[in-house]
Structure formats: C-alpha cells, structure tokens
Amino acid sequence: PVIYFVTPTYPRREQIPELTRLAHTLLHVPRLHWLVADDQEKCNGYMDTLLNRFGIPYTHMVSPMPSKFRNEKPAPRGVANRRAALQWLRQHNLTNGILYFGDDDNTYDLRLFTEIRKTQRVSMFPVGLIADYGVSGPVVRKGKVVAFLDSWVAGRRWPVDMAGFAVSLEYMAQYPYVNMPYKPGYEEDLFLRSIGLKMDQIEPRGNNCTEILVWHTQTKSKKLGMVRLESKYLDDRSNLGAL
Ligand code: UGA
Ligand code: MN
C-alpha cells in the first residue's frame, strides 16, 4: 500500500530547512505520497518550487488556521492542515493505503516506514523526546497493547502523540464521522475515538514497542511574532533568488 504522509507546515524562517530535511528522509521511501498542508491563505509559488524540486509525489494544499484560534494559547497547531488532508483523502475516495501524520519538524528512522506499511487497522509505536518522560508510547504485554506511558495523560483515553500511530484507509473508510477537533492536546485522542479504536485492535510495532523510530525533535525558534512578517517576505517573489 501507498503511505499517505500528512505534513502540516506553516510559514516561518525555519520552514524551508525543516521541509528540506524531511524531504531528504522521504526521498528514501518508496510508494509514498506526501500531503503537504500549509497554514496560510494562498498557494504560494515558493512552496511549489521547493516541493517540485524534491521529486517526491506530493499534493500541496493550503489550509489556514481559522483566525479565531490564532491568538489562543495554546493554539490548535496543525489541525486545520490535517483536517484538509483528511478531506482530500475522502474526496478522492482513497480507501487503499496507510495514513500517517508526520509533522515537519520530527525525526523519522527509515525503518518506521516499513513498520507502518504493515498496518491492518491501527498501529502504534513509541515516540521519543516527548515531554518529561522523554518518551510516549504503548505498554505491551504478550504482544498486546494493554496501557500507555505518557507524562501528560490528562483524562485522555488514548494518551498518544500524533506521530505515534498509523491508520489503514480501508479501516478508516468504515467511519463516516472521522474528526480532528480544534482542541489543543486532545487532537489525537478525539481523532482515534472518531475511528472507533478499541484496545485489542491495536497493532504494536517496532519490536513490540521497544524501539524508538520517531522523535519529537523541536527546532529552536524565534518568537511567533515574527511569523506574519516572514510570510509577507516570502510572498514576495523577488526574494526567491535563493530557491
Ligand atoms: C506537538 C505534537 O507533536 C503535534 O502533533 C501537535 O499537533 C502539537 O503538539 C499540538 O497539539 O499543538 P509541537 O512540536 O508542540 O507538536 O508543535 P509544532 O511542531 O509547532 O506544530 C505541529 C505541526 O503543526 C507542525 O507540523 C507545524 O509545522 C504545524 N503548525 C504549527 C502549523 O501548521 N501552524 C502553526 O501555527 C503552528
Ligand atoms: Mn513539533
């Protein structure tokens, strides 16, 4: 099956380096379609120039965060983007393949792709560098997921990170009300509830969840106040010399 790798991204000075690094990982992966959903108002020439040059099969969409959420703290980051990608998958009636939410700043071991390609319904695996414990992931006993380790459980039924699971589109197609709400911290939980996940269905990956194949790395960044300025700068095609 094809892996549909959904990447939310947004304009800031680190956007091009993050996407370049991620592309150089994805270039090693066969049968992958990259859904790049950009958090801005309009399709932008610089993004297409960049994505085209990588040579990875991709779809570029824009999906701005609704303005009412922009100033919330925390804001629902990457949600409008993932919702747009879910809508795209549904509109194209893609019921064959594997869905994976891969943020633009995480670090992916190539073995992750072999693991998620085997997904029958929903597979799960640990994510490194998450919060205080430094890892978030399923606890496995006798080959079955029985619990979760996460430093911020916060009443979630599925206390997992966005990068810690993959879903088969064939399985997801059975659920007409697939949803990812604008609720910071609860996106994964409510998405997994919306596809009717049950504990005994979860397929543990990465040697029964003992191997870390994806890390929640974060790039040290300038304050968000820079973002609008940057996007204005990037919109100006006269600045595209470097691309
Ligand atoms: C953590 C989780 O790993 C994310 O999956 C989750 O969406 C996020 O928390 C959250 O719930 O806020 P974190 O590293 O804290 O991620 O957040 P970012 O990497 O800044 O953002 C997540 C994704 O959304 C990234 O791919 C980023 O490019 C994108 N994003 C971020 C936007 O599209 N718009 C923004 O304004 C900010
Ligand atoms: Mn991140």
Image (cartoon, grey):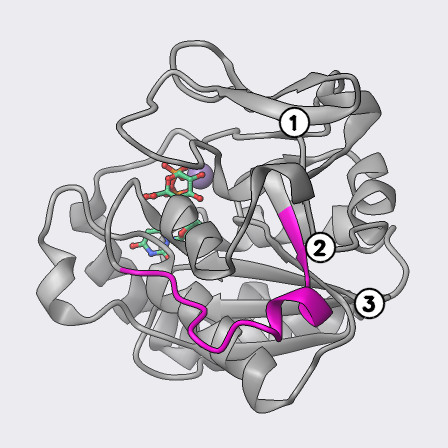
Question: Can you identify the residue that label 2 sits on?
Answer: 121
SS under mark 3 = loop
In the picture of the structure, the residue carrying the numbered disc 3 is: 2
In the rendered view, does 66 fall on the left or right side of 81?
Answer: left
Magenta includes 170?
Answer: yes
Label 1 Cα crowd, 10 Å radius (few <14 / some 14-19 / many 20+): many
Name the one closer to the observer, 69 or 52: 69
Determine which of the numbered discs, if any, sits on residue 145 in the image.
1
The answer to which of marks 3 and 1 sits earlier in the sequence is 3
Q: Tag 2's secondary structure?
A: loop
Q: Position of residue 102 (x, y in %)?
A: 58, 50
Q: Which residues are magenta?
A: 166-181
Q: Quadrant of the N terminus?
A: bottom right
Occupied quadrant, residue 202: top right
Give whichever of discs 2 and 3 has the lower sequence position: 3
Q: Residue at position x 68%, y 65% from top?
A: 171
